[in-house]
Image: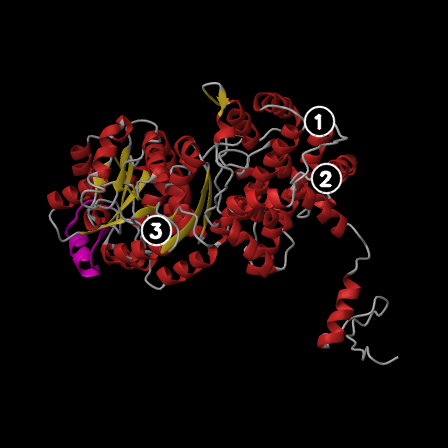
Amino acid sequence: MTNIIFIMGVSGVGKSTIGNLLSEELNIPFFDGDDFHPEENILKMSKGLALNDNDRFGWLQKLNKLAVEQQSKNGAIIACSALKKSYRDILHSSIKESTKFVFLDGSFNQIKERINARKGHFMNSELLKSQFDTLEIPQNAIKIDISLTPHKIVKLISKEIVDKAEFGLFGLGVMGKSLSRNLANNGFKIALFNRHVKDVEVDVAKNFKNDFEELSTALPFDDIESFVNSLQKPRKIMLMVNAGKIVDYVIEDLLPFLDAGDILIDGGNSNYHKTKERFDYLKSKDINFVGTGVSGGEEGALKGPSIMPGGNKETYNEVKPYLEAIAAKDANNLPCCTHIGTEGSGHFVKMVHNGIEYVEMQLLAEVYTILKALGNNPDEIANILEGWKETTNSYLLEITIDILRKKEGEDWLVDKIMDKAGNKGTGNWTTITTAQLGVPSTMITSALFARYISFYKEERIVASKNLETNNTLDINFTIEDVLKAYQFARLINHYQGFKLIHEASESYNWSLNLSELARIWTNGCIIRSDLMVELVTTFKSTKNMLTDEKIIQQLKKLKPSIKKVVSQCVLNELATPNLNESISFLNSFAIENSSANLIQAQRDYFGAHTYQLKNDKTNKFYHTDWTKN
């Protein structure tokens, strides 16, 4: 929440006058930065000499220290020229989220007349030109024309800071509502927007505000222009609407009311290609765009999600205080939010996050299938999984245990649920992307297709009768083997997911940090787990999990169990596609000489696609007429 106000501008614009009046208006103390200049600075300026950066450095640090002290109290108004961006960076260092700059703007002649009329001040009009030469117009300040009366200026500043919201939420679905409450609980004054649809969606924002005490200062709207005008500049608006064309429609609805430098944040599951297009489109209109992945579901959004923002680093720094404040915290109390990279990188990693999530869910479903086939009821399976938490804990494991224990009357609820799994598109996008980039993320594809298969319920029933699925089981492995098979498959899943992210980073020049990405996935998100915590360290020394000695030894130790479980499941006709794929992938990958030489020969035979020879160090390509002896 803003409680440090810097009144800035060249000498003579009235910083002290406005600062004193604003102090009375807002009832917070005023400090004149000139009073904190060391004697040598005052002496230099009184001789008509301009201060240099070295002269100002200690002075700016002293004012920053003052601001930090006042920020923890009632706040403060501080008058300071703050002519350069680098000066302003020092002034709000470590408290940027609590600060606002007010730029008092006037012409050279207008200010020169004022200075020449002043008496007993060390600044004279001869120094004014050097100040104008030094001045870097701030992009994100409240700009005020000094030709207005002091009373009018103070009222404008007060209205902008006190009456206006810091952050806007556009769209009050499940996630939008939870994020709104999260922001409010962190002390931010927010504006809320939800569309008005007669007899369908009426006064949604207003009613939502009235339902929760923490939203008492929130500003509710169902009119876009009023919503945008209620926000401090540069406006920061987070879009929480369904991915797809609706995002473009919303952007077009907002654009007429936005100003250069305003920031739009897309917090939905948008396709990263579309995010790149929107980024470029809005850049052409001087509007900043941040494509942001948000993971954690309804509860995570309220209590602290994992947040993955992609866009310009400078733009991220403008929204960083808000996003990092509402994010989950890792084991070191650092926010599970970081600048991912440029363009669509934030939505890309969220997409892959969801792909990894698909596999993790499918693996637990397959474990459930196996343990059920071994004669365990849902409660007994939950008890088995409870024991796995010591070595293999994850959020998805925990919720699976809760699900299996849930009853309706005497029956387990899970047994009543239709076995048709839906999807919202991110698994499909990940599968398309992994094919486009040529990365073998086979487990994500397998998990997606398992969902597709599940949806053909009626045809599956017919097939089960026509093809007489085996009901007589002869299983020769232990529950410990199932645990080890599960652990093996999870390692392969995470290898493939992070491999896809790394290859995309290389292809798109994103320079993604895998260790930092793993860190923000240690809490708040759906795929948080003990394994993810370990990967934070792993990725500090390698970008390839399969070169890490600890993981290599784990895979070797677990491999006998995955082979045993998968082969037994195949023989007993138990559907475990992702467990199968994990060992199938490694068998195909961890092999020096594959059968691809025959495939390449076949391609050359019918299509003259050429081939290379193993022992030819020239890397020359050859073609053979295979019909001749």
| Image position of 13 (left or right of 472) | left
Q: Give how far across and how far down residue 99 sits, in percent.
A: 32, 39
Residues rendered magenta in the picture: 104-121
Q: Give how far across and how far down residue 240 sits, in percent.
A: 35, 45
Q: Single out the mark in the foreground, 3 or 2.
A: 2
Which element type, helix, strand or loop, lies under badge 3?
A: strand
| Residue 231 in sight from this viewpoint | yes
Residue identifier under label 3: 264
> Which image quarter: residue 285?
bottom left
Residue identifier under label 1: 479
* Position of 345 relative to 24 (above/below): below
| Residue 340 in sight from this viewpoint | no
* Position of 123 relative to 371 (above/below): below
Q: Give how far across and how far down residue 29 sits, in percent.
A: 24, 31
Quarter of the N terminus within the rendering: top left
Residue 566, labelled with which disc?
2
